[in-house]
Amino acid sequence: MSAPTPSAPATAPLSAIGAASQPALFHNPVATVFGNGCLDQLPQLCTGQVALVTFPEAAPLGLIDRVRALLGDRLRHVIADVQPNPDVAWLREVHPRFWQVAGECTTVVALGGGSVIDTAKALIVGTASGRFDELLELLAAGQPFVPARHKRLIAAPTTAGTGSEVTPWATLWDAQQLRKYSLHLDCTWPERALIDPELMLSVPAGVTLSTGLDALSHALLEIPRLSYNTRGMVDDKKHHGALFRFRVFHRAGKKCERCGGIIEKTTLSSRPFYWCPGCQR
């Protein structure tokens, strides 16, 4: 009895599917290391003198001593008072002092959550004048720029939620002026992300919950853009893409510029969420 004839493959070759169905390519320039104890790779990754940016609880948790034991005399400067949502008023004092004291450091290690990593991204960008306000002026202008100087960044997250360790983005808050700045430059991509699950074992349940909700709120913030664009109503001058989202930002109770509806506000995790029920239902 002859062997059965093999059936034809169920999946058609890519050339037969068409260009629209070709697989998307994804590239992230951050070299990511995952595994228990991978923080111990710091001595091999850090070149020259090192500055550490971390959070207040890092000292009682023994994290600063652990980094100091790994790096020895190469650890020259520690900033351990980073608070949630870095504010420009605080950075205005810390940034120039950092460059004065840690100017010879070539590498910055950010050990903490999203706010710590965002703070480190702001600190590694140096200005020609040495003033932090010069950086804010460049960001406010909204034009691409090359920083006068910068440092290498290695990120070791202690929470899971923001993903700041694998992006160039940093959000800087101005509570007094009720605005925020988004910093993203080629140099603010971390060179390496050390995802060490052991660093997250001692995280309180409340922090684990809030960072998870933070990730969820980031995803939900895309709903206004997606729901608006999928309805096929685009005004390049006012509401295209992410720009539409900021047309409703901080405008709760006011009329939507497009449909005249009243903009509403809710809170997801600790983040405000603004939307227009008429345009974004």
Image (cartoon, rainbow, N blue to C red):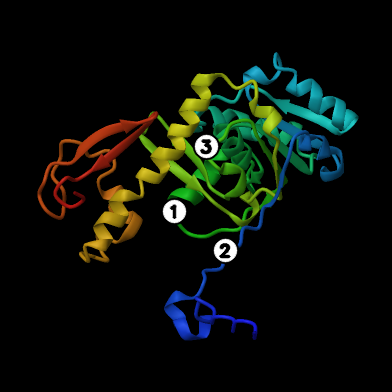
Q: CA distance from mark 2 to mark 1?
A: 30 Å
* Residue 11 to residue 152: above or below: below
- The residue indicated by pointer 2 is 26
Q: Residues within 10 Å of mark 2 (few under 14, many from 20)?
A: few
Identify which amino acid the numbered label 3 is placed on.
Gly
- The residue indicated by pointer 1 is 141
Kindly indicate the quadrant of the structure image that contains residue 110. Answer: top right
Q: CA distance from mark 1 to mark 3?
A: 30 Å
- The residue indicated by pointer 3 is 161
Kindly indicate the quadrant of the structure image that contains residue 251. Answer: top left
Which residue reaches farthest front? 1
The mark nearer the N terminus, 2 or 1, is 2
Q: Position of residue 31 (x, y in %)?
A: 71, 52
* Residue 122 to residue 266: above or below: below
Identify which amino acid the numbered label 2 is placed on.
Phe
The mark nearer the N terminus, 2 or 3, is 2
